[in-house]
Amino acid sequence: MGELVSPGPGAAPGHEQVGPKPGEPKPGGRAGTEEGLERAAMALLRRDGVLAGLNLREVADEAGVNRGLVYHYYGSRGKLLRRALRRFGAESRSQLSAQQSLPFRARWQSFFQTTITHPEAIELTTLLLLDGTEPLRAMPFLERTQAGLRRAVEEGDLDPEADLLAFHALFVTATYGYTLYRERFAKELGVAVSELDTRVSSLIHDRLLVALGPRDDQAGPLGNGGAN
């Protein structure tokens, strides 16, 4: 990973470039340059927001490398974004996989927490989907998640009359949208982001997920399919 360098001409106040100083050798050769470019892309997305798009020339300038290297290494913005998604989405993918064994409510609340803690995957996926140049699924774990929802019904943790496809789409939409706009929401609502995160998380667990549990006449002896 390159060092932080001073902003170049036209850089936003207080914004620092990511990568080696222009003209300096790039540590790690091509691999180091690619990592620097992908980190620069993420830095620009965080600074300007997803809807501002991403200019490859700005990415090169941010990383402090020759602009031609971006096209030489990736060929297109979509390829750069996909490589960045692979790099920065690894942590969230690992955590989401580990959460599959959690009980129903804990699993979906953990999905929310993981997504807002590691927003890079959602930001990159959103930009790729807006571009429409790379084949990509908005729900990469669709089959596994639907299987988990069916299992929750069988185990008595979810109302058997619940629309599983609609629940999946609604929850993912709400989580993705909140992840992208949470800082703006908090600013307009006049609360700290961390406080808003806690309040939204509590609402999800205490209201939404509870409401989708089995009705009293369907629940187990403890009112939640026999769960603690």
Image (cartoon, helix red, strand yellow):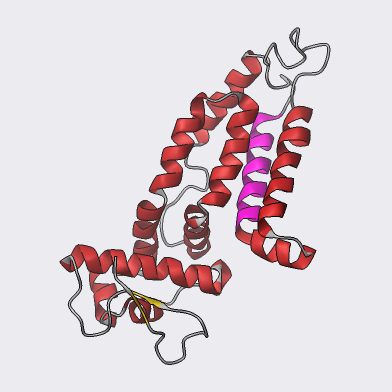
Q: Residue furthest right?
A: 216
Identify the residue at image location x=48%, y=79%.
15
Looking at the picture, does residue 5 appear above or below residue 121? below
Instruction: Indicate yes or no whether the magenta region holds residue 177.
Output: yes
**Magenta segment includes 202:** no
Determine the image quadrant of residue 71. bottom left
The spot of residue 77 in percent (x, y) is 38, 69
**Residue 127 or 60: which is nearer the viewer?**
60
Q: Main secondary structure of the magenta part?
A: helix
Residue found at x 71% / y 35% = 205
Question: Total label count?
Answer: 0
Q: Residue furthest bottom?
A: 9
The location of residue 72, given as percent across then percent down, is 23, 72
Does residue 54 appear left or right of residue 29 in this picture?
A: right
The residue nearer to you, when weighing 137 against 105, is 105
At which x and y percent is residue 86?
36, 52
Left or right: residue 161 versus residue 42 is right
Residue extending farthest to the top is 221
Q: Quadrant of the C terminus?
A: top right
Instruction: Point out residue 7 in the picture as x, y percentages from the top left corner.
Output: 41, 85
Boundaries of the magenta span: 163-179
